[in-house]
Image: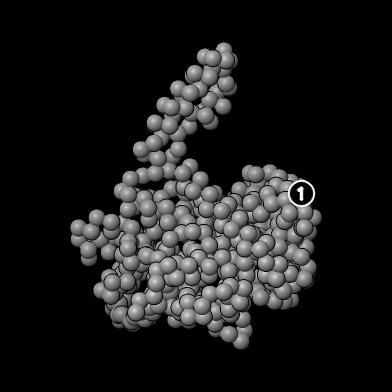
Amino acid sequence: MSAHQAYSFFQSVERSFDKAAKFTNWDLGILEQIKACNSVYQMRFPIKKDDGSIEVIEAYRVQHSQHKSPCKGGIRFSDEVNQDEVMALASLMTYKCAIVNVPFGGGKGGIKINPRKYSEYELEKITRRYTAELVKKNFIGPGIDVPAPDYGTGPREMAWIVDTYASLRPGEIDAAGCVTGKPITQGGVRGRTEATGLGVFFGIREVCNMEDVMKKLGLTLGIEGKTIVVQGLGNVGYHSAKFFREAGAKVVGLAEYEGAIYNADGLNEDDVFQHRKKTGSILNFPGATNLAKNTDALELECDILIPAALENVINGDNAQRVKAKIVGEAANGPCTPEADEVFTQKGILCVPDMYLNAGGVTVSYFEWLKNLSHVRYGRMEKRFTENLNGHILGQIEELSGKKVSDKERQFIMHGPEEQDLVHSGLEETMISATREIMAVWNANPAIPDMRTAAYISAINKVATSYAELGIFP
Ligand code: NAD
């Protein structure tokens, strides 16, 4: 989420919240409670570096809301970490989880270090000590608060966390559920890597299947044939481009920080990725035209623009020149409030980050469920489904006297693997969230944009939960 210049990041989240809250009838007290960060844990601890010196590390964990347990949110390793940022990110997690019906409160953690300046052993010591501090204050656990990866952290750090937690809580049967984003061998779930990009695709596809929305934008129904531009060929951008292309869309532009390329006939993201790996640059890709600046990609003629790199890339300066009909915020905070205003004026539909990139947290929820159930998805039903499908198919072939092709047989027989079920759960999640937000928006024409509608949807769900919970005396 972009920080408005005159406001801190947390204050700017509060402002977006207030803008949306005006469209609800909730008691002011309940709204205040939702906005507030319930618990903020600021810690300092020493580590001994490889050269023998001692460094004091500054770190945070914020639990924004416990209207549902556990709290959920990533841990960031970055020089820029500060309390305000962690509070803002924790509150955004509350709203994000509510929108996609993931039954968690929001949380976030941060350690103020540049991970590139530390050895692997030092990073392990920092991560393990941070986890121990969380355990000491009861700030982590499968039923309390469940971290995940964010900037500067990944499966490796999550493996250190679960190992530290499990060793400090011997015998806790659900210990693996204390953190998500783990390697598969440590209790992770298949389908996590592509989850955010796939969620972006499912969300946009649902929007493109809405007749009234497409008519207003002057677009045809469906994804097929749509032209797409993606900024950032990292985890989220790469997978978004892949799923759009596979569904019959044309990825006509791709941008990386060193430049941007265009091909009206469509680009294959993996070929471009391999070209970049080989040559060190996205530029000079065979058959494509180089653009003068990487930001030129944002202003290309296309149906759907997917910023999947950084925050604040579409702002008061360039929003007027955006020609896409739909902007899908795959990154966090790629469009500033000024850009939002321009989009509203120009009739561009901006599909907001808070729900569009919720694929990661949704699949984290599936990982946590897997950990609590102690069984891999698909293990119980895969063979049963295959046997049943085989039987049904056999009966149909016998009765009709005809045989299906081998390809069809394979498709019909197939029992679900873990990845199939994770993708299917994500698809259901993104489709229902899109419909819920659109229903909120359609119910009141005064709501200016989809972002505000998404906030309203979140506020209504969290407020209902508080209202039904009753507030403690
Ligand atoms: P990543 O580091 O894998 O990819 C980002 C890519 O953007 C990199 O390839 C980088 O070179 C490129 N980039 C940097 N500056 C650029 C510029 N000026 N122009 C064009 N490209 C540029 O990161 P990611 O995990 O793909 O995350 C991207 C965004 O999505 C971030 O805003 C992140 O917060 C958000 N997000 C990620 C996830 C997830 O599951 N990974 C979930 C939710 C939101």
Task: Report whether residue 251 is seen.
Answer: no
All told, the count of numbered labels is 1
The amino acid sitting under disc 1 is Thr
The quadrant of the image that shows the N terminus is bottom right
Q: Nearer the viewer, residue 425 or 28?
A: 28
Residue 456, quarter of the rendered image: bottom right
Is residue 448 positioned above or below 57 on the image? above
Q: Position of residue 320 (x, y in %)?
A: 77, 71
Neighbor class of circle 1 (other Cα within 10 Å; few <14, some 14-19, many 20+) is some
Residue at the image position 36 percent from the left and 67 percent from the top: 145
Residue at the image position 28 percent from the left and 56 percent from the top: 174
Q: Position of residue 222 (x, y in %)?
A: 70, 47
Residue at the image position 45 percent from the left and 38 percent from the top: 416
Task: Report whether residue 422 is seen.
Answer: yes
Q: Nearer the viewer, residue 195 or 251?
A: 195
Is residue 145 positioned above or below 111 on the image? above
Asked whether, in this view, residue 213 is left or right of residue 44, the answer is right
The quadrant of the image that shows the C terminus is bottom left
Is residue 364 positioned above or below 386 on the image? below
Q: Residue furthest bottom?
A: 6
Residue 256, quarter of the rendered image: bottom right
Residue under numbered circle 1: 220
Q: Position of residue 376 (x, y in %)?
A: 36, 44
Q: Position of residue 71 (x, y in %)?
A: 39, 67
Asked whether, in this view, residue 272 is left or right of residue 122, the answer is right
Label 1 beta carbon less than 8 Å to ligand 1: no
